[in-house]
């Protein structure tokens, strides 16, 4: 009798395994569910993919050439079949410069996220896990950093640390400016994000499995790496997707003020700065770079909101 029941259970298990969809099918269903319930997040994801392609392989897009090619006879032309977004005061094609300007924006956004995620995770996890005097001291430092005027702090870092990073890194002057902007913006955004991670770390260390790991003799480093950090990863991912949009907007603001990436490197903020003098007569000089900045920031924010709803267990299952 036992052998019959065992055989039946085995057959049912095999039947369930055969009926269970494979990974490609589950991925397709998850993608369709995401598009259905999070249409704005799906729009943001598609636009982000396009931005990544623009930054990585700008030659994939039609009608792109040299973004720095001048043509004085073609200056201040409006949108046309030859120049889709028109030309600027030097006769450079705006469409091409916007395509290549995505590389600057995505590079700065990615570096900001790497700096911010690293600093915020270290401060938030260690402060929340150890607590006590260490937590008090770290939070006072965070309070001081949050109280700093952000734009002034970034301009101070960009203009004063002219030898950072050192010359042996082999970076060009524009590359050094990108690194300084990324470090300054990343540190500022990390301070606020560390508060959120700290709260998640405090909640995680009170769970019973953390107490059990501590009882059996697990070290603090092992508990943090195996139990605390995995629980704050969704928060890091959500914060990163939103911080990229804010970093791109900050870089555009710095370039508009003249402290960002220097010409002739293509930058959306720099294009807006150069459009000021002829804005009333040639509004297309500001419309298309401004639209690129708006769509980029909007897409990253919508994608971040959708990822928050999907990854946050408290919101999972909501539409």
Image (spheres, grey):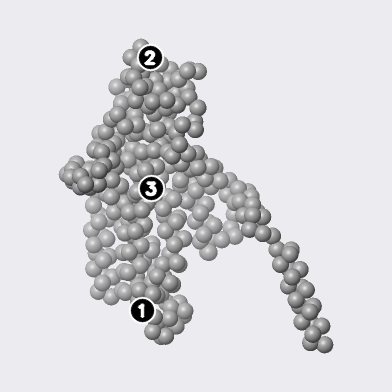
Q: Are marks 3 and 1 in contact (CB under 8 Å)?
A: no
Residue 246 visible to an observer of this rendering: no
Residue name at image x 40 percent, y 70 percent: 225
Q: Quadrant of residue 115?
A: bottom left
Does 279 appear above or below 127?
above
The percent position of residue 276, horizontal first and vertical second, equals: 31, 25
Residue 255 visible to an observer of this rendering: yes
User: Could you tell whether 275 is left or right of 304 in the image?
Assistant: left
Residue name at image x 49 percent, y 31 percent: 61
Which residue is more in the foreground, 39 or 271? 271
Which residue is more in the foreground, 51 or 285? 51
Q: Quadrant of residue 30?
A: bottom right
Q: Dot 3: within a 10 Å radius of its alpha carbon, few (fewer than 14), some, or many (20 or more) residues? A: some
Which residue is more in the foreground, 255 or 294? 255
Query: N-terminal of the two: label 2 or label 1?
Result: 2
Tell me how far mark 3 sits from mark 2, CA to CA: 35 Å
The residue that disc 2 covers is: 74
Q: Secondary structure at mark 3?
A: helix
Q: Secondary structure at mark 1?
A: loop
The residue that disc 3 covers is: 110
Mark sitting on residue 219: 1
Image quarter of the N terminus: bottom right
Residue name at image x 45 percent, y 26 percent: 64
Residue name at image x 40 percent, y 22 percent: 93
């Amino acid at each position: 009798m036992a052998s019959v029941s065992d055989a039946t259970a085995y057959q049912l298990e095999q039947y369930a395994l055969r009926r269970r969809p494979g990974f490609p099918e589950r991925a397709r269903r998850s993608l369709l569910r995401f598009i259905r319930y999070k249409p704005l997040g799906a729009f943001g994801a598609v636009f982000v993919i396009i931005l990544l392609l623009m930054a990585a392989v700008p030659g994939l897009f039609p009608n792109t050439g040299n973004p720095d090619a001048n043509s004085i006879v073609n200056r201040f032309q409006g949108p046309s079949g030859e120049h889709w977004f028109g030309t600027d005061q030097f006769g450079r094609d705006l469409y091409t410069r916007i395509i290549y300007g995505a590389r600057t924006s995505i590079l700065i956004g990615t570096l900001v996220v790497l700096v911010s995620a690293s600093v915020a995770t270290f401060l938030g996890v260690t402060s929340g896990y150890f607590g006590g005097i260490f937590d008090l001291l770290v939070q006072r430092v965070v309070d001081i950093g949050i109280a700093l005027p952000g734009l002034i702090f970034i301009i101070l870092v960009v203009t004063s640390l002219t030898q950072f990073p050192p010359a042996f890194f082999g970076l060009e002057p524009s590359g050094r400016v990108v690194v300084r902007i990324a470090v300054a913006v990343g540190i500022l955004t990390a301070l606020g994000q560390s508060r959120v991670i700290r709260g998640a770390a405090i909640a995680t260390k009170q769970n019973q499995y953390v107490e059990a790991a501590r009882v059996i003799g697990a070290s603090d480093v092992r508990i943090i790496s195996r139990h605390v950090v995995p629980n704050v990863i969704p928060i890091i991912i959500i914060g990163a997707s939103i911080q990229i949009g804010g970093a791109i907007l900050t870089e555009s603001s710095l370039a508009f003020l003249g402290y960002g990436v220097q010409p002739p490197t293509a930058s959306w903020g720099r294009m807006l700065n150069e459009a000021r003098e002829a804005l009333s007569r040639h509004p297309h000089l500001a419309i298309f770079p401004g639209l690129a900045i708006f769509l980029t920031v909007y897409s990253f924010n919508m994608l971040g909101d959708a990822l928050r709803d999907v990854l946050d267990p408290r919101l999972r299952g909501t539409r």
